[in-house]
Image (cartoon, grey):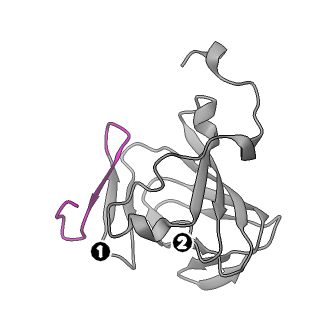
Amino acid sequence: MSRSKLPIAVTAAETAPRTKPSNYPEPFASRMAGREKRPLGDLFGLSNFGVNLTRLHPSAVSTLRHAHSKQDEFVYILSGDPVLRTDAGETTLHPGMCAGFKAGNGDGHQLVNRTQEDVVYLEIGDRSAGDSVSYPEDDLMAVLGANGQWQFARKDGTPY
């Protein structure tokens, strides 16, 4: 997309949500019900990192608990009070709080909305080539292919 066709600025909450709710194969994709992502970085042609405005409805989760080998991630809570799950346990986050997840440390993370109100946050992550993801609570692993698409397999290497 040429720069002339990219927007100068947008109202994040008014942008289109991602059309495919999850890249996970089943039975994992259906566990992402109640999560809505608006890919903001893509709108501006950003290729080194991604930015999503994400909304979690009550009882929804951000993702399967996971850890990246090469991709750093960061979340900033705009509204609501999600629970951050990591190897250290659970921490309730509040608007204005943020958390970062260093690549390669193996500490899986996930946000869970256990309230009756929506949670809204920004998530930012780089797009490091050769990244892989481990899922400590699920029989799943992922590798970012050369084509930029995630390839999923069971922990024994059997593809989904």
In the structure shown, which secondary structural element does the residue marked by tag 2 occupy? loop
| Range of magenta residues | 145-160
In the structure shown, which secondary structural element does the residue marked by tag 1 occupy? loop
Crowding at mark 2 (Cα within 10 Å: few <14, some 14-19, many 20+):
many
* Between discs 1 and 2, the one toward the N terminus: 2
Q: Residue, x 57% and y 62% (percent of image)?
A: 35
- Write down the quadrant of residue 111 in the picture: bottom right
Where residue 84 appears, x then y in whole percent? 63, 76
- Residue denoted by label 1: 139
Where residue 106 appears, x then y in whole percent? 45, 70
Q: Is residue 101 magenta?
A: no
When the figure is inspected, residue 122 is found, relative to residue 105, above or below; the finding is above
**Residue 21 seen in render:** yes
Report the Cα–Cα distance between label 1 and label 2.
16 Å
Q: Magenta residues: mostly which secondary structure?
A: loop
Quick check: 109 left or right of 143?
A: right
Residue 109 is marked as 2
Which label sits in the foreground, 1 or 2? 1
When the figure is inspected, residue 143 is found, relative to residue 32, above or below; the finding is above
Q: Residue, x 56% and y 61% (percent of image)?
A: 102
Where residue 42 appears, x then y in whole percent? 57, 35
Crowding at mark 1 (Cα within 10 Å: few <14, some 14-19, many 20+):
few
Find the residue positioned furthest to the bottom.
Answer: 89
Amino acid type at mark 2: His
Quadrant of the image containing the C terminus: bottom left
When the figure is inspected, residue 134 is found, relative to residue 72, above or below; the finding is below
Q: Residue, x 55% and y 55% (percent of image)?
A: 72
Where residue 28 appears, x then y in whole percent? 37, 68
